[in-house]
Image: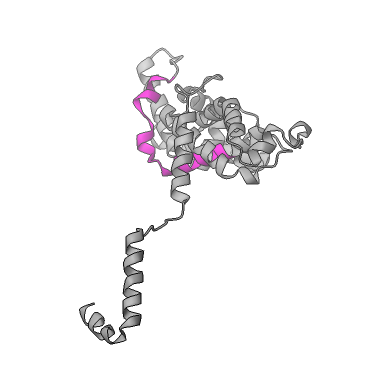
């Protein structure tokens, strides 16, 4: 492709694709969308935490005390697990 | 080139680097329009430019610790915006990019037969959309938007020589595609 061909192709491309206005700006404020994106990212990055109700801990503690007091019941518990 | 005024501790750039959301919003308000305009020049789709502007500023916030306050914010944001726009171009199918909106905004033909000229412009735009995204970005910025090669090179992260080479390759491929369609530029 010589310089003449290149110039012709340039002109054709310029005719086909109009240049964007110098003062082009978004039609809406994009800041809320940026904040939503940041919030979604922050939620995604948070470590997953498992919370166990106090009642479950009490039940587990009671069971441990019971098993420690009566070791002979361990096979019975294992049987029903 | 380092910018001395923004390297002062406590400046907007420093606060942004430390993750200050107010500083980030101030930078967003200041640079939203040029970043949007730059993206629109590359992708030529207003809806995509909106989304990519949000994506760009999200990437900017994510990379705030890597920002060097002694350097200007604008060119750094432009580089990130260019990468986001190129990612978008790579994800698109060429055939769907010539939208009705784009066809409407084509300039009026200078020839006597507007029907034929419009068809040639549409075929040219479609042929251009089939070019590799990296060539398209260089050609549209340098040829259509007439941006300085130095700025295009900085945004694409390549040398000025590489920009000129990409533009030349883009024009050559475009010409070949048009010749295959029976159009002699």
State yes or no: residue B88 in magenta: yes
Between B12 and B81, the one lying in front of the other is B12
The range drawn in magenta is: B80-106
Which residue ends up furthest to the right in the rendered image? Answer: B4
Direction from residue A69 to residue B64 in the image, left or right: right
In the image, what residue occupies the spot 43% across and 42% down? A40
| Residue sitting at x 42%, y 44% | B91
How many numbered dots are placed on residues in this image? 0
Residue A6 appears in the figure: no
Quarter residue B59 falls in:
top right
Residue B54, percent across and down? 48, 34
Residue A4 found in image quarter: top right
Return the residue nearer the eye: B126 or B154. Answer: B154
Give above or below for A54 relative to B122.
below
Residue B51 image offset from top left, x and y in percent: 44, 34
Furthest residue to the bottom?
A72
> Residue A33: where, in percent of width, then height?
45, 32
Residue B41 in view: yes
At 46% from the left and 14% from the top, the residue drawn is B110
Tell whether A31 sits left or right of A55: right
Q: For residue B174: magenta?
A: no
Q: Residue at x 46, y 39 (%)?
A: A37
Location of residue A9 in the rendering, given as x and y in whole percent from the top left corner: 52, 29
Of helix, strand and loop, which mostly describes the magenta segment?
helix
């Amino acid at each position: 492709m010589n310089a003449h061909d290149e110039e012709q192709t340039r002109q054709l491309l310029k005719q086909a694709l109009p240049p964007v206005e110098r003062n082009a700006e978004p039609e809406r404020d994009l800041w809320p969308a940026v904040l939503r994106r940041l919030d979604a990212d922050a939620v995604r990055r948070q470590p997953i935490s498992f919370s166990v109700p106090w009642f479950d801990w009490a039940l587990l503690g009671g069971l441990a005390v019971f098993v420690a007091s009566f070791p002979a019941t361990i096979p019975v518990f294992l049987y029903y697990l | 080139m380092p910018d001395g005024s923004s390297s002062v501790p406590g400046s907007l750039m420093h606060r942004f680097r430390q993750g200050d959301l107010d500083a980030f919003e101030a930078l967003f308000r200041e640079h939203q329009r040029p970043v949007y305009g730059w993206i629109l020049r590359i992708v030529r789709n207003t809806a995509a430019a909106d989304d990519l502007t949000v994506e760009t500023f999200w990437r900017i916030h994510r990379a705030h610790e890597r920002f060097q306050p002694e350097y200007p914010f604008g060119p750094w944001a432009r580089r990130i915006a260019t990468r986001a726009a190129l990612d978008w171009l790579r994800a698109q199918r060429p055939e769907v990019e010539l939208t009705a909106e784009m066809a409407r905004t084509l300039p009026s033909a200078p020839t006597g037969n507007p029907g034929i000229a419009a068809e040639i412009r549409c075929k040219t735009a479609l042929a251009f959309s089939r070019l590799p995204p990296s060539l398209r970005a260089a050609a549209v910025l340098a040829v259509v938007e007439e941006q300085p090669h130095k700025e295009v090179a900085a945004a694409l992260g390549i040398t000025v020589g590489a920009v000129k080479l990409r533009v030349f390759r883009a024009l050559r491929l475009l010409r070949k595609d048009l010749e295959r369609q029976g159009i002699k530029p």
